[in-house]
Amino acid sequence: MASTSADTDIALKGHAELRRDRSIVKGDAIHYAFDTDVADAYGSVVLADSGRLFFGPEAHFRVEANQGYIVAPTYRFTSNGGRGSAARINVVDVEHTSVEHGTYTTCACGDRPGWYLKASRFNIDNGDDTGVARNGVLFFQGVPIFASPWLSFPLSSARRTGLLSPTISYDSTNGVEFTQPVYLNLAPNYDLTLTAHTMQRRGTMLGADYRYLSSSYSGELAIAYLPDDRLARANRYSLHFKHDWNIGNGFGFYLYGDRVSDASAASTLASSGTVTSSTLYRQEAGLTYSRTPWYVLFRVQHLQSFDSTTIYAREPQLNVRYARYNVGGFDFGMETDATRFRPTVSNATHGNRFVFDPYVAYSVERSSWFFTPKLKWHFASYNLTSIGSGVPSGQPNQFDVNVPTLTIDTGLRFERSMSLFGHAYLQTLEPRLFYVYTPYRNQYHAPLFDTTVTDFGIGELFSDNTFVGHDRIADANRVTVALTSRLIEPSNGDERARFVLGQQYDFKTPKVTLTSSDSTATFSRTGLVLGASYKIGAGFNAEQAAQYDDIDDYLRRASIGFSWAPGELRVLNMSYRYNRAVDYSYAGEDVEPVSQAVLAAQWPLTSHFSAVARLDYDLHSRRLRTGLVGIQYDASCWNLSVAGEKYLYATSSTSATSGTRITVQLQLKGLGAADSGLKKKLSAAVPGYSSPFVQQDSNDRFTDLP
C-alpha cells in the first residue's frame, strides 16, 4: 500500500521496496521524503547496492548519495563472501562502509563460523578491496588467538599488504619456532616480504625478500640475519640475490649469488627459504650474447667454500661458441674458452687456460638409415701462475695439449604397424653403431680445473669422451653397439615406449685417468646397458636403466623409477638407485655402495583430509636418510597443515648432520591466506604435488541482489 503527501513524501507498507539505479531499499514500511531524498525503512529492512547487502530492523538512507545507516544489522559482501554483524553500520558512499562494534568473517556458516574478527570498528573500502579493523581480536573455533589495535585484510584474492599466515614448528636443535611474515605490496611489479622468525634456543631472526619484475628484467634479493645466536655465540646471516636483464638485440646480463656467514648457517636459517644448505656457495655476474650462430658468455665468478676439496672459481671466463648446420650437408662449429682459475684453498695449483675446440661433421640422412662422420680437435694451452702442494716433481708452468677425435655414427631404421592390447602402434627397430677413435696424449700435467668423469646413463653410450670438462680427453678406440625399439602413436607421433640395449667394446685399453695414481681399466668391454621408458594411460610413466657386467656376472648399477598420477591431488612417485661396491678407481669414481629407495606421494584420505609424504631410505645402512610426512585439512574457510620431517644438511662434501622438525601452519581464507613456505617445501619434496586447498569463490556482484 502506498500513500503520498503534497508531492513531498511517500509512504509504503507491506513488502515495500524502493529502487534507484543500483540502490535498493526494502522493508515492512518505508517513508521517503522527496525534498531530503531520505528513505526511512522499518521492519525486515534490506539495503543493497553493487556488492553490498545489509539486513536489519531499521535503516535511514539517502538514496541518491548512497549514504545512511542501519541499526543492529547483519551484512554480506558479494565480492568475496565476507559477512558479519554489528551494532550499527554507516554507509559512507558507494565504496566505503563503517561497521561499528561488529564482526567479520568469510565463513559461510552463520552462528559458529570457523574464524571471525571482532573489532570496535571496521573501515571497509570496496573500491580498494581492503578492510581495516580497529582494536580487533581474531577468534578461531571460538578461541581468541590474536589481538591488534590495527589489522588490515583483503576483500579479494588480489595481492594486498598485510600479515601472512604464521607458522609454528618444533626443531630438535632450535626448539620451538614461530614465524610471522608481513607482505608489503609496494607496486604491481615489485613487493617485499618481511619475516620475524623466533627460535627458542637461538633468538629472533629477521628476514627480507624483495622481488621485482619488468618487461626486460626481473630479480630477487633475500636476506636473513640472526644476531647473537645463543647456540653458536655469533651473528649469523644468509644472502641470496638474482637479477636477469634482457638488454635486447641478443644481449643479456645476469647477477646470481648465495653467501652465508658460516658452514651451517643455511640450515639454521632454513625456514627463511633464501639459501639451500650446501658446502659451496656461488656469486657470479655475467654478460651473454645469443643470436644464431653465435653464443658468447663473459662472467666473473667467486666461490665461498666450507670444504677442504679444491674447487675452482672463474675470475674471469670468456666462452665463445659458433655452430652452423646443414651447410651443403656439413655441420661445423667451434668452442673457444679463456679462463683464469682461482682455487678455494690456498695450497692448490691455479692459473690460466685457453681452449680451442673446432669440429666438422657431414651427415647423410635417409628415411631408413643415416651415416655421420665427425672430426674434432681439442687444443688447450696452460699458463700456471702457481704450482700447488702434492704435485709431482717436474710439473711445467706452461704447456699445450693437442688431441684429435674421430667419430662415426651410423644406424638403420625399420618400422612396422602392430597391435598391442587392442591398440594400434607404429613399432620401430633401430640398430646403431657408434665408433670413436682418440689417440693417447699424456695429460697428467694438466690440473683438474673443471673436469670429472661422466655420470652413468644411456646417453654416455654415444659420447666421445668419458670425462666432462676440458682438462681430460679420454683416449679411445672403441665401438658402441646398440639396439633401440620404440612404440609410437600413429595419430600424433607421441612416443609411448622406448627400449634400449647397448654395449661398448674397446679395441685398446684406455690409459687416460683423472690422476696419475688412478688405475686403468682391465676389461675389454663395458657391461650391458639396458634402458626402458613407458608412458601408459591414466597418468603412468616409468623409466629404468641398468648396467650389467656380463663378464663377471653381476649388476653394476641400476635405477628404476615410476610416477602415477590418476587424478586431481593423486600422485605416487617411486624410485630405486643401486650402485655395487666395485673398484672404479681407473675412472676416479666413488666406490661406495648405494642402495637407496625413495617414495614420494600425495593422496586424498577424505573429502577434507589429504596426506603427503616423502621417504628416502638407505637400504645399505638400513636407515631413513630423510623423510617428510604431512596431513592437510581443508575446511570451507580455513585450512590446516601439519608436517613432520627428518632433514640432512651438509657439513662437508663427505658428511652431513641430521635434525627433525614438526611444522604447523593455519591459513584463514579471506584473511591473507598466502603461503609462507610450507607449500614450497611440499612441492619440492613431492613431484607433481598440488595444493588441496580450494580458495573460496568470489561470487558475482549481482548474483545475490534481492
Image (tube, rainbow, N blue to C red):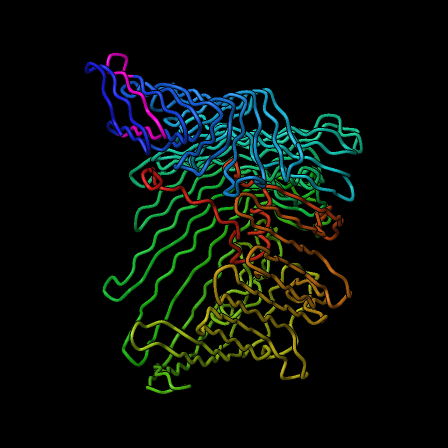
Comparing 158 with 5, the one in front is: 5
Q: Residue drawn at (34%, 41%), measured in percent from left and top?
A: 700
Q: Residue drawn at (37%, 87%), measured in percent from left and top?
A: 419
Q: Is residue 34 magenta?
A: yes
Comparing 586 with 387, the one in front is: 586
Side (left or right) of 39 relative to 176: left
Q: Which residue range is magenta in the image? A: 22-37
Q: For residue 492, which quarter of the picture?
A: bottom left
Side (left or right) of 164 relative to 277: left
Q: Is residue 702 magenta?
A: no
Side (left or right) of 638 relative to 492: right
Q: Where does the image place residue 184, in percent across and percent down from the top left?
A: 50, 27
Q: Quadrant of the N terminus?
A: top left
Q: For residue 562, which quarter of the picture?
A: bottom right
Establish if 443 lies above or below 440.
above
Q: For residue 605, which quarter of the picture?
A: bottom right
Q: Where does the image place residue 272, in percent across and percent down from the top left?
A: 62, 37
Q: Where does the image place residue 206, in percent across and percent down from the top left?
A: 64, 28
Q: Quadrant of the C terminus?
A: top left
**In the current view of this chain or complex, which residue is farthest to the top?**
35
Q: Where does the image place residue 118, in percent across and percent down from the top left?
A: 58, 27
Q: Residue drawn at (68%, 39%), measured in percent from left and top?
A: 168
Establish if 329 lies above or below 276.
below
Q: Main secondary structure of the magenta part?
A: strand
Comparing 461 with 214, the one in front is: 214
